[in-house]
Image (spheres, rainbow, N blue to C red):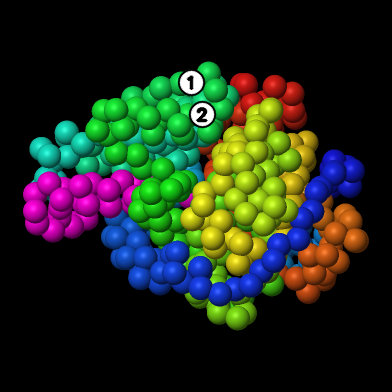
């Protein structure tokens, strides 16, 4: 095991979990049921693997590690394929229903019934890569124009993947949060429709749909397990993934739902700071993290409603433990199945390994030899050049390959 895990500096903040209503009211059981019925009907749908990392589990002293590998999802390489694409259909259905004065269903849209009208409805979003790719794919499937805003540090490989799906990609000089602002502003000026995975005052329906789409992944994982995990380590970002999974686990397992541990880069820890402040808190990103999909300084208010009630623990991790974790999955040392994963996918596993090198932190999280940990491997190889640099152990300048 790489010595970076032993020497890693992790910051810890305690949550104040009081499971109440948010896991059922912000995202209802019907929201998840609707997304399941729609997404499982899409051409090419198949559950993604829940990989047992028994070798790593034995090495670090936990009972089991279950890694939900989202790399194969719809050929797009990440869990985001479930959210942006589903939300795009829902936005189109609501807008067409309003314009036409009659109910337009998702099946109507998928069938091409309203292709002429859809060709005049532009959908936009800001992204670090995966959400935009999902939105572009969803728009391409139904013929809707798509405009994606990316920040300065998004790799060109990820930008090109969106262009290949027909998106008009706009790169700005600022960070992710600046790209969100520009997407909102230009959408308002041009009559376009924002399909974002983060919520703000007065904007909740598309982010709710995005999180509902992610519920397909959580349900697949739950149905593949014979009993509830004791812990789930969830990467942060704006909080949409973490909140959706936490709500889905609560709805599925009830009082037996696992302890929720939130993991973020120490360079972009808005949920960590929110936990310390007891309310949604923005952070200014001074330097981009290697975990591109988690480089977010402003939490989703809707996601925070759920996490404030469900999350027990918040951790930050340094960038230097990410490349060794990517390599450990791709070149297994302990007999596990090889998994090719992206930088943001391994945040939970990196944190888990590092925590188990620290007896005090393990005790705080209630981790021991009997713990069964669920991890969300949120992306596969979404940028081949970055993955190749990591595998070549070229840990400098990876973000800019």
- Closest to the camera, between mark 1 and mark 2, is 2
**Mark 1 or mark 2, which has the lower sequence index?**
1
Residue 163 visible at all: no
Q: Give the SS element for disc 2.
A: helix
> Front-most of 282 and 13?
282
The x, y position of residue 350, in whole percent, is 74, 48
Residue at (69%, 72%) from the top-left corner?
230
The x, y position of residue 221, in whole percent, is 53, 66
Q: Which residues are magenta?
A: 79-108
Asked if residue 346 lies left or right of residue 158, the reply is right
Residue at (86%, 66%) from the top-left corner?
363
Asked if residue 31 lies left or right of residue 53, the reply is left
Q: Which residue is mark 1?
A: 172
* Whether label 1 touches label 2, CB < 8 Å: yes
Q: How many marks?
A: 2
Q: Residues within 10 Å of mark 1 (few under 14, many from 20)?
A: some
Residue at (39%, 24%) from the top-left corner?
169
Q: Which residue is mark 2?
A: 178
Residue 274 visible at all: yes
Compared with 374, 12 (above or below) is above
The x, y position of residue 355, in whole percent, is 82, 55
């Amino acid at each position: 095991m790489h010595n970076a895990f032993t020497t890693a500096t992790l910051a810890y903040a305690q949550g104040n979990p009081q499971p109440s209503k948010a896991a059922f009211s912000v995202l209802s059981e019907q929201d998840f049921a609707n997304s399941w019925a729609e997404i499982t009907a899409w051409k090419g749908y198949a559950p993604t693997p829940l990989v047992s990392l028994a070798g790593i589990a034995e090495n670090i002293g936990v009972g089991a590690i279950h890694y939900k590998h989202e790399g194969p999802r719809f050929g797009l390489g990440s869990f985001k394929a479930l959210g942006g694409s589903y939300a795009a259909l829902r936005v189109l259905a609501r807008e067409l229903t309003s314009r036409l004065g009659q109910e337009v269903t998702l099946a109507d849209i998928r069938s091409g019934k309203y292709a002429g009208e859809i060709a005049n409805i532009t959908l936009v979003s800001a992204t670090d890569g995966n959400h935009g790719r999902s939105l572009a794919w969803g728009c391409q499937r139904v013929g809707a124009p798509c405009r994606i805003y990316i920040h300065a540090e998004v790799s060109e490989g990820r930008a090109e993947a969106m262009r290949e799906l027909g998106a008009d990609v706009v790169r700005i000089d600022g960070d992710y949060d600046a790209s969100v602002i520009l997407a909102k502003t230009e959408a308002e000026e041009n009559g376009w429709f924002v399909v974002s995975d983060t919520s703000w005052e007065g904007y909740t329906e598309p982010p709710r749909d995005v999180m509902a789409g992610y519920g397909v992944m959580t349900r697949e994982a739950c149905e593949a397990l014979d009993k509830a995990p004791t812990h789930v380590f969830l990467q942060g970002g704006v909080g949409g993934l973490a909140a959706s999974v936490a709500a889905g686990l609560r709805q599925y397992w009830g009082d037996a739902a696992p302890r929720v541990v939130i993991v973020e880069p120490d360079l972009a820890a808005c949920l960590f700071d929110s936990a310390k402040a007891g309310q949604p808190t923005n952070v200014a990103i001074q330097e981009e993290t290697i975990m591109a999909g988690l480089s977010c300084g402003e939490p989703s208010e809707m996601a925070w409603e759920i996490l404030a009630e469900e999350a027990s623990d918040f951790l930050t991790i340094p960038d230097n433990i990410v490349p060794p974790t990517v390599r450990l999955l791709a070149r297994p040392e302990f007999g596990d199945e090889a998994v090719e994963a992206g930088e943001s996918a391994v945040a939970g596993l990196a944190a888990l390994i590092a925590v188990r090198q620290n007896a005090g932190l393990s005790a705080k999280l209630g981790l021991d030899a009997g713990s069964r940990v669920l991890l969300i491997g949120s992306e596969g190889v979404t940028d081949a050049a970055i993955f190749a640099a990591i595998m070549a152990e070229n840990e400098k300048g990876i973000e800019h390959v």
